[in-house]
Amino acid sequence: MADSRRPRKKKAAPRGADDLRRPRAADDLRQPGGDDEPRRQREADELRRQAEERLEGLSAAAAAAAAAAASPSLPAPEELVAAVHELRVHQIELEMQNEELRRAQLELEEQREKYFELFDLAPAGYLTVSNNGIVGDANLTAARLLDVERQLLVGQPFSAFVFTPDRDAYYVHQRRLQKTAEPQTYELRLQRVGGAARGDAETGHFWAHLDSRLERAAGETPSSFVTFTDITARRLAEEEVRRLNAELEERVDSRTAQLAAVTKELEAFAYSASHDLRAPLRAIDGFSAMVMEDAAAALAPEDVRHLERVREAAQRMGRLIDDLLGLSRLARRDLSRERVDVSALAGEIAGELLAENEGRVVEVVIAPGMAADADPRLLRVILRNLLDNAWKFTAKHAATRVEVGIADAGQERAFFVRDDGAGFDPDYAEHLFGAFQRLHSAAEFEGDGIGLAMVLRLVTRHGGKVWAEGRVEQGATFFFTLPRDE
């Protein structure tokens, strides 16, 4: 029947008949209107087009055989052929929809299995708790953390699993959740049922971090969704930190008391050095001078030289005592930081040195705009000692240059004092800042070996660092940092 394969004008079927022929899709259940109606129409048109293509794929011989078998002697009316065509199209549509539904159902089952695997194997315990506090559902992690079978957990009041001393706190948070509908986050101890049954005090309960939020489904009684994790290890670590901090504070108090005692002993020593040691030195110097004056005629030149050396040693000892006392006083002095113009301070000290050494030819170069947060009196001592050092070790040069500036030192800025004098052997640089440690003899360059030790002490008190670079007869550069007071 060739006519049955020609395109024919479709007849509009009643809505009720169409509903009987094919199931309604999910979108068909929505109310018409908006953007859904055109989309549903496009999907229906596409489905019919695919069904008609599949029907056109049937062989003409099969269609003719089916028609002959239905009525071998009478020609099929046009309306009957159209109805058969329409029924077969809808049959194919149903088959395609059923196939799609089967695929969707399989995918849904797979997704549900994955969801339940994720739900049960999640690292946190998950519970649903009804408005009256009864556990409605729980994952395997919750049952494992509470050391109870899941079927024994579901249907029980969750408060039964809260450690008794912490139940009041749990009730407070639950009432606040029901009243405000705001998520609650809190920490308390939960009962480990298996450990409690065994009488094991160590495993009878554990610290948990809980998050509760309200679930309000339409037409259902409000319930809460509770998640919790075991934070016992963290709480133990925090307790250990608190214990160590308390122990550290006790040690600090003890060390502070010991330091105060040592400071008092140093003050007593300074007093003794200031008074008890000075008297013998004055006696040695004074009596030596008297001998030189009263018995000058009877003394040989060699005896006079010996007495002069005794007096010089006594006087030098007195200066060393003064230096030690000065270092001790500076070390105990409280810091009073303020913004200091380093360039102006260095220029002032250089002017003093030029006035004190009028015969020297020294070119002084000071970088402008240098400033630091420091104690102005202590910073003056630092710069005075470093510039004194530069003046001293360039004394044997007819003309010399001394520079004060600032340079990059890693992630901070360092001030420096540079000279082109005697310099030093880099292998002995670590000895430069030790008290009374000298790399040059007193005959070469005068001094007591205390100036750089004082610089180190004062820079360290400011929280900075000091170091030196140099070569023999190629000059030296002394660097120091002064961090900002945060």
Image: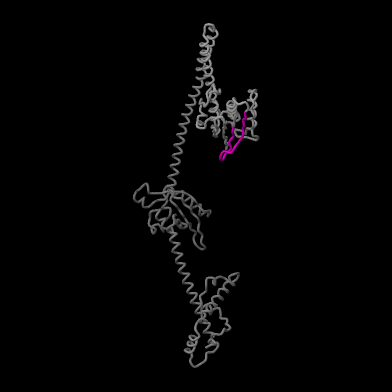
Residue 408 part of the magenta-drawn span: yes
* Along the viewing direction, whichever of 292 and 214 lies nearer the viewer: 292
- Residue 143 x/y as whole percent: 40, 56
- Residue 153 x/y as whole percent: 40, 57
* Along the viewing direction, whichever of 224 and 38 lies nearer the viewer: 38
Residue 316 visible in rendering: yes
Residue 453 part of the magenta-drawn span: no
Measured along the vertical axis of the image, is residue 71 above or below residue 110?
Answer: below
Quadrant (top left/top right/bottom left/bottom right) for the C terminus: top right
- Residue 127 x/y as whole percent: 45, 57
- Name which quarter of the figure residue 30 lies in: bottom right
Residue 283 visible in rendering: no
**Residue found 57% across the figure and 84% down from its top:** 8
* Along the viewing direction, whichever of 312 and 115 lies nearer the viewer: 312
**Residue range highlighted in magenta:** 400-417
**Residue found 56% across the figure and 85% down from its top:** 6
Q: Main secondary structure of the magenta part?
A: strand
Q: Is 269 situated left or right of 358 in this image?
A: left
**Residue found 56% across the figure and 40% down from its top:** 410
Measured along the vertical axis of the image, is residue 314 above or below residue 183?
Answer: above
- Residue 177 x/y as whole percent: 50, 53
Q: How many marks?
A: 0
Measured along the vertical axis of the image, is residue 45 above or below residue 373?
Answer: below
